[in-house]
Structures are given as C-alpha cells and as structure tokens.
Amino acid sequence: MPINYTKYIFAALFILVPISVSAQISYTNETMSDCPVEYSCVPISATTTPHQFEKIFYMTTAYLTSGLQSLQQNASLVDIVAPQVYEVDANLVATGSIPIQIQTIAKAKGIKIMPLITNQDFSQSLMNSFLASSTAENNVISFLVSEAKNQGYVGWQFDFEHMVATDSEPYSSFVEKTAKALHEHSLILSVATVARIDDATSTSGYKNWSGVYDYEQIAKHADFISIMTYDDPNSIGPTASLPYDKNVLTYLAGKVPPDKISLGIPFYYYGWDVTPSIGQIGPASNVPSPTYGQIVRYGGIYSRWQFVRANYGTLELFDSGLGAPYATYYLDGHEYQAWYDNSISVQMKLDLAKSFHLRGFSAWALGQEFPDVWNAISKY
C-alpha cells in the first residue's frame, strides 16, 4: 500500500507521461478560502453524524521520523494508527514488530494501534502458496491473536496485495477464518482492498490485483474494509480525483454496507512531465537545476514539494472538475506538474465520505502530508 498496479513501486516518484487539464482556477494557499465551484466544502455538523467518523492513519518505516512528528503533533485527531510493519515472509510465517516510538506516543495519547500485515514484497507466488496451506494460515492466525493480546493492539488490517483473481475464494475463506479467531478474543479485523469501478475481468489489473477481492464476502466477516482510493491506476493527474472516488463508492453500493467502508485518502503527490512536443521552455531564471535523477529520487512528499516551490517557482492552480490542486514549474527545458492534496481537496473527499455515510477514512501515510490537510481533518 499504496497500490497502483504498474505504478506501485514508483508512486512517490515523478512519472513522466502527457496529461490534459480542464477547468483551471488559479489560487494560492494563502489567499484561497472558498471552495471551487460546483462543490460544497461545509462539513456536516457533528450533531447530524449517526456514528463517530473514524480517522485512521497509516505509518511506514520509510518515513518514520516525519511520521512520528506528525503523529505527536496531531494526536488528538487520530483514532487509529496503522503501521505497516508485519509481513508473511518467504517461509510462510508472520514476522515483525512496531517501533517503540509509535507505541509510546499511542499509549500516551490514547490512540488505538491496528498494525498492517502484508505479503513480503507483495509476492504473488508467496500468497498463492500461503493460501494453499491451511497449516500456514492457522499458524499466522495464532500469531495474530497472541501478538495482539501481548502488545495491546485493537486488531489487525490485512494488506495482502498482488494476488491472482483465481485466489479470490481461498482469500475470502482466510478472511472469514481469521475474523472468527480474532473476534473470539474481542479483536477486530479490517481488510485493505484494491479499488475498482467495474468488473472488467479481462484486464491485467483485475487478474493480478483487484479481482481477488470479493467485496461482499469480505464485508460479511471483516469489521470493515479500507478501500485504497488513494491511488487511481489510470490517472494521468491526481493520485485520486474526486470523480474517481465517487465512481468507486458507487460501484461498492449494495456490495458493502457504507458503515463498513473507510475511504482511502492520499498524503503523497504525483508528478508529471508535460513538456509540449514542439518548442522549448526555459527553466526558472537564476536557479541552479538539479539533475534529472534527483527529480525522480525525491518526488512525492511534502518535503520535496517545499524544495520545488522554493527553488523553481510554481504557478498554483485548482482543477474543479477533478477536485484537486496542482502546480506547474519549469526545469531544464521541461514543464512539470505536481498534483497533490491540500485542505480543500481533502475536505471535498471527507464531504464525499459523509454523503455516502461511510465509516470514516484511512490516510496513507503520516509524514508525507501537506500540513494544511489537518485544517480539514479537524472539522470532522
């Protein structure tokens, strides 16, 4: 997690393909306070909320330092912290542990801990072998129960990915078996699922990523699912546009009860090379240009964005059709766009979640976010 089929490994990097943009509205973070046209950003009053709007935040050891700082600063807004630190390894056994710093902050602030467990390297063959072994499954389930009880976790989230669609039935059975065991010990099970908007079974994405998830069967047994709407595999702009989120939720309607859906929200951005094929565009004047390799290496998170904004000059815009802000800048004769999420776009997504009466949201991942997103989150 996050997942974007062929884009997964490079989700935080600059990926270079053309893009088209529409409905542009200029703004700056300092001056824009109103919502873009056609959208309402007024949060629903707490008095009209039928249940607590659950706020889940993922953490990854790749951004442990910045993630810990964000967790500490925003602890009052965090219901559950979900570190991605456990895995089923090549020996089909569960291993891992949570950094003591996360446990310390969570305990001091009264935050629930719900770790993720993944298949090592998102290996497809590993999961195929694992789901074919009842012994391996039972051993992992026993580990999950004992580890949660010993460490004081509220439960677990499955983040098993890159599975073949033909493993759908055994995976659903594994979810059912695990949920039963955890529930017997008052522990919860949630499942992170790759999003889809249809059942186009002939696509590679369906066959190798999303098709394994039988949403209806999983929802019958798991406490909830976190739908990974923070990564649109077909996007050539935002990590996940508002229309994409809406299409996913519309597809899920009737398959999963809304109070069992947690909407995925991205805290990272996508960067694109949008240089016109004809003509040359010069870089910003009087600014030293990093090499192309540096651009690829540091794309995707707020700290990189700060560097770009400070050194190359950006024209900041908002696409009201996609419900997402972006910025353009120039470097070494190329024009680039960075699509990200800020307080306005996050508030739109939270409003969307509210309008569908969802359980809450799951954000990937602490330490990557633009700081102003907390202004939107604080309203919920």
Image: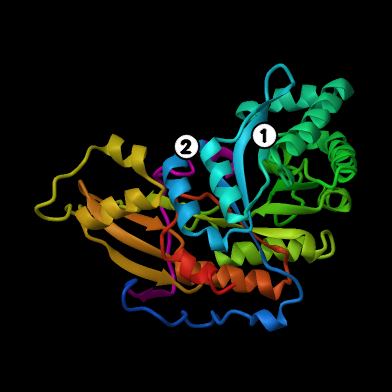
* Residue 194, above or below 34: above
Q: Is residue 16 magenta?
A: yes
Instruction: Identify the residue at image location x=31%, y=60%.
Output: 328
Say if 239 sits above or below 201 in the image.
below
Q: Is residue 7 visible?
A: no
The number of callouts visible is 2
Q: Position of residue 216 (x, y in %)?
A: 86, 53
Q: In this figure, which residue is indicated by the disc labeled 2?
A: 62
Is 261 rendered above or below residue 298?
A: below
Tell me residue 365's x, y (percent).
52, 49
Q: Residue at x 68, y 45 (%)?
A: 114
Split into 4 quadrants, where in the image is the N terminus? top right
Find residue 63 and report its image quarter. top left
Instruction: Report helix, strand or loop for mark 2.
Output: helix
| Magenta highlight range | 1-27
Label 1 packing within 10 angstroms: few (<14), some (14-19), many (20+): many
Q: Position of residue 51 (x, y in %)?
A: 75, 71
Q: Which residue is mark 1?
A: 118
- The residue positioned farthest toward the left in the image shown: 286
Describe residue 153's horizontal placement relative to residue 335 as left or right. Answer: right
Q: Residue at x 54, y 67 (%)?
A: 377
Magenta segment, prevailing SS (helix, strand or loop): loop
Of the residues shown, which amino acid type is indicated by label 1?
Answer: Thr
**240 lies left or right of 260:** left
